[in-house]
Image: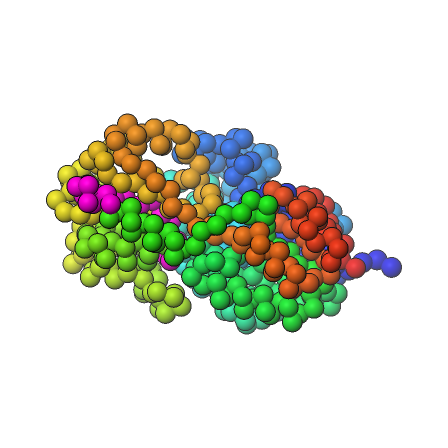
Amino acid sequence: MPLDCYITLFGGAGKIGGNSILLEDKESMIIFDLGKDFDKYRKFFQFPFTMPTKSVQKELIKTRLLPEIKTSKRQKLPLYVDYEGTEILEPRVACPLQHVFITHPHLDHSGFVTLLRSDLNIHMGSMSELIYSSNIETRKDVTLENKLYWNLLKKDEIEPRLKILKFHDGTGIESDRLRVIPYSVDHSVPGAYGFVIESSSARIAYTGDFRFHGPAQNLSKKFEDRLREENLDVLIVEGTNMNVGRVGSEEKVEKDAHELIEKSFQLGNKLAIIEVKSSDIDRINAFVRVAKSLNSTIAITTRVAYILDKIKRSGLEARLLHGIPKLKDEVKLFAKGRFMRWEKELIEKHEDMEILDDKAIINPKERTVLLDSGRFNVFSTTPPKGSLYIQSISEHVSEEEEYDEDRFINSLALYGLIVYRLHSSGHATPLDLIRFVNEVKPKILIPIHTEHPEAFHELFKDITNVIIPEKDSPIPIP
C-alpha cells in the first residue's frame, strides 16, 4: 500500500542553517522555511566584494545555492522567478504548492523568500514580517535577493513585489487538506514560531529555532506543553547546540555588560560601542537599561532606529516583554555620510531627535554608549584608544557577519580598542533539548539545523524512531 505522507529536507540536514522542509500529504504540500546556506555561499561569493547581483540562473541555480525543491515523486516545483539583469519573469506554469510558512526572519530561514513567485501564499508572524521587511529595506548593498524583494516595474522600487500574509499565535491556517497552527517560541529575535501540522496521515510539529533560557522562555514552555498533549507522530527539532552546550542567560549578558562598561568609564574612557543585531530587540533593551543606569548618552544607528520606529508605528510594541526604547526621550541618533532614502524619511519623522555625527565618536565629550548593528569601521571613524568594543551577537545568520573575524579584530587592535564578547545563545541547550524530547515523546524524531544528528540517535533511539535526514531524500511517514 503506497504511503501518502513524506517529509524532505532541502537544507539543514546535518548542518546548521539553510533550513528548507517540504511536507507532502496526498496531493497537499507545504514548505517550511527557505533559508540561505552561508557555508555554500562562501564557496562562490565573499561579502561585500562579490555577491549575486544579476542572474538567478548563473549565480543561484548553477551554483546550487537556491534549493531545487522536488516532490517525493521527483517532480520539480516551479517556485522561483527568473531574472537576468532586466526584468523579473514569473513562471508560466501553475505550481501545485501554494503555501510557504516562515518560522522567523533570520536569513538562514528566510533568505530566499524574495525569489519566490508572486502568486504563492507566504505566511509569517506579524513581528517577523516587520523585521524581515525592515532588514531588506535598510540594506545598503544591492544583492540579487534584496533586489527581487521589490516590484521593479514600479518607479523608484518602493513597492514590495510579494504579499506576505500574517498569522497569529494559536490561530490555525487551512492549506488544502493540511492545517497549520503557529505557536510563539523564544529565540534571539522576537516573533519566532514553531508549528503544529494536522493532516489526514499524521500529526507533525516543527520547532524552528527556539530556546528555554531567554526573556520569553515561557513561550517555548507553552509550546512544549502543547506538544506533550498532541501525541505527535513526527517531531522535527532544531539541535544547534546539541553536544556543545553554551551556558549563559540574557540576564548574565546584561549584568556583565554593566560591569564592563562601568569599569571602562572608571578608567577614564568615555565610549563603549556595542555590536548588536538590529532585530534583537531584547538585547537592545538590555543595553539601553545598562547605559541609563550609568548615566551615559545612548546613541543608536539609523538601522536600529528604523526597526524601533516601525515597531512603534505598527502597534506591535505591546507584544514585546520590555517594549522598545523611546526614540526621542531615551536615545540619540548616530548618523553619518550620505543618507539613503529610508534614512532621510526616518530623520524627517523625528526632526526633534538629536543627531550625533563622527565627532561624538572621535572625541566624545561625555560618556556615550553606541548601539551599532554592523561592524564599526575604525578606519573611517576612529574612536579614542582604550574605548570599549563589545560584540554581542547571536550565531552567524547574515552576510555582514561573514567578514573575516581576524581582520576585523586586527583593525580594532590597531587603534587600541578593548574587545569583549558577551553572548547568550538563541538556541536550546543540550540538556533542555533532552528534557524537551523526553517530555514530548514523538513516535518519529527528525533532527535539523545541527552538526550532530548522530547524537540525537544515540540519546533517543530507545524511546523513539530517530531518523537522521539526508538532503533531498524523502522520508516516508507511515
Task: Name the side, left or right, on which 362 lies relative to 422.
Answer: left
Nearer to us in this view, 311 or 163: 311
Nearer to us in this view, 357 or 322: 322
Q: How many marks?
A: 0
Check residue 270 for magenta coloring. Answer: yes
Check residue 153 for magenta coloring. Answer: no
Q: Is residue 243 visible?
A: yes
Residue 309: x, y in percent? 30, 59
Task: Name the side, left or right, on which 367 lies relative to 206.
Answer: left
Q: Is residue 160 visible?
A: no
**Residue drawn at point x = 59 percent, y = 63 percent:** 195
Magenta segment = 263-282
Residue 31: x, y in percent? 61, 55
Residue 205: x, y in percent? 63, 62
Quarter of the figure with residue 120: bottom right
Q: Is residue 187 above or below residue 265?
A: below
Task: Name the side, left or right, on which 146 lies relative to 40.
Answer: left
The quarter of the image holding the C terminus is bottom right
Nearer to us in this view, 65 or 221: 221
**Residue drawn at point x = 70 percent, y = 68 percent:** 231
Task: Name the side, left or right, on which 286 lies relative to 247.
Answer: left
